[in-house]
């Protein structure tokens, strides 16, 4: 037990340091760790699974919380924290960036408590029969999520204005960009799955290197090009009422677990869906929900690998 605890703490410490580097995703580091779990050529030694599992759990947990720092201050979110930057950027430009980070981290801590007190004890009892029931319906559930995401890009310019092509172009400018992005990313996924440029004999991963970390690059390039100077940050403000904390935690727990349970869906999307379902309108509650959703998504997805009888294929 002592060795397991030390391994988990070591993973958390290492991940806390690496999480401050914008664009570096914990999955990239875990991919290297996975390769070290096999015997190297010419050797007979490999890392023990008893050490790798707690080390990975520590890295994932620390990343899901500490990564809030570059996500808010540098607009460098991972795929599960993308929606955090929406109110987070506003907080930074208002001099409340520390408050945004603390709210997101508080949501992550609340998500950990939910996992320990509720999800951990109940998952082995509930999830295997739930997966048996829902597995045949996974395809249309994912299609519904995709449809909701596309419909959320519907033109929002209102009904006022001069009719004609000018109004049409104005309405569909952002919507068209969203639809094109969706189509191109889907096409890239099909290419990497069915015609990957990386041979299966040379690598055991196709999709992850193409996506992990690349979410941050457009925002970092824009920040460098625009040279935006945020105002001085006030470290004394931290406002979070109990009702907002509970509201955000419940929404984040729902969204994070939905994302962890179903393939393809990330914590950011799951948190946004849960935010709509629970009618979150407060930015503080929203940041809490995103922190909880991200933590439960990463930690819950990792935990599902060890739930007896669940056997969810993750690719």
Image (cartoon, rainbow, N blue to C red):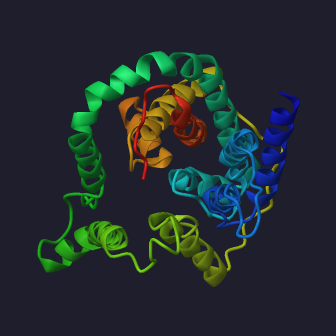
Q: Is residue 78 above or below residue 41?
A: above
Whether residue 243 is visible, yes or no, is: yes
Residue drawn where x is 64% and y is 56% of the image: 34
Locate residue 125, reporting x and y percent. 46, 15
Looking at the image, residue 158 sits to the left or right of residue 253; the answer is left
Locate residue 57, reporting x and y percent. 69, 41
Figure quadrant of residue 69 = bottom right
Looking at the image, residue 213 sits to the left or right of residue 206; the answer is right
Closest to the observer, 94 or 226: 226
Closest to the observer, 168 or 192: 192
Whether residue 281 is visible, yes or no, is: no
Figure quadrant of residue 312 = top left
Locate residue 152, reporting x and y percent. 29, 52
Residue drawn where x is 27% and y is 61% of the image: 157
Q: Residue furthest bottom?
A: 225
Q: Is residue 36 above or below residue 285?
A: below
């Amino acid at each position: 037990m002592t060795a397991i605890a030390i391994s988990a703490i070591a993973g958390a410490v290492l991940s806390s340091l690496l999480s401050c580097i914008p664009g570096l995703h914990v999955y990239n580091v875990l991919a290297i760790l996975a390769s070290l779990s096999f015997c190297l050529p010419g050797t007979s030694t490999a890392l023990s699974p008893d050490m790798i599992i707690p080390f990975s759990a520590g890295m994932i947990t620390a990343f899901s919380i500490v990564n809030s720092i570059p996500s808010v201050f540098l607009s460098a979110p991972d795929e599960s924290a993308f929606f955090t930057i929406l109110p987070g950027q506003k907080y930074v430009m208002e001099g409340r960036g520390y408050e945004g980070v603390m709210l997101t981290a508080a949501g992550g801590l609340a998500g950990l408590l939910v996992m320990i007190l509720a999800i951990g004890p109940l998952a082995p009892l509930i999830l295997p029969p739930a997966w048996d029931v829902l597995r045949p319906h996974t395809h249309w559930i994912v299609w519904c999520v995709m449809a909701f995401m596309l419909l959320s890009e519907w033109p929002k310019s209102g009904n006022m204005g001069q009719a004609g092509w000018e109004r049409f172009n104005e309405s569909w400018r952002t919507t068209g960009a969203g639809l094109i992005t969706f189509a191109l990313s889907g096409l890239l996924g099909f290419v990497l799955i069915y015609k990957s440029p990386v041979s299966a004999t040379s690598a055991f991963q196709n999709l992850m290197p193409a996506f992990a970390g690349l979410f941050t690059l457009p925002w970092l390039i824009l920040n460098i090009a625009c040279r935006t100077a945020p105002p001085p940050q006030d470290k004394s403000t931290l406002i979070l009422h109990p009702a907002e904390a509970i509201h955000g935690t419940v929404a984040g727990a729902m969204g994070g677990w939905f994302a962890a349970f179903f393939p393809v869906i990330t914590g950011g999307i799951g948190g946004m869906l849960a935010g709509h379902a629970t009618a979150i309108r407060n930015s503080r509650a929203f940041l809490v929900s995103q922190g909880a959703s991200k933590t439960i998504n990463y930690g819950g997805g990792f935990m599902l690998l060890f739930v007896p009888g669940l056997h969810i294929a993750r690719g």
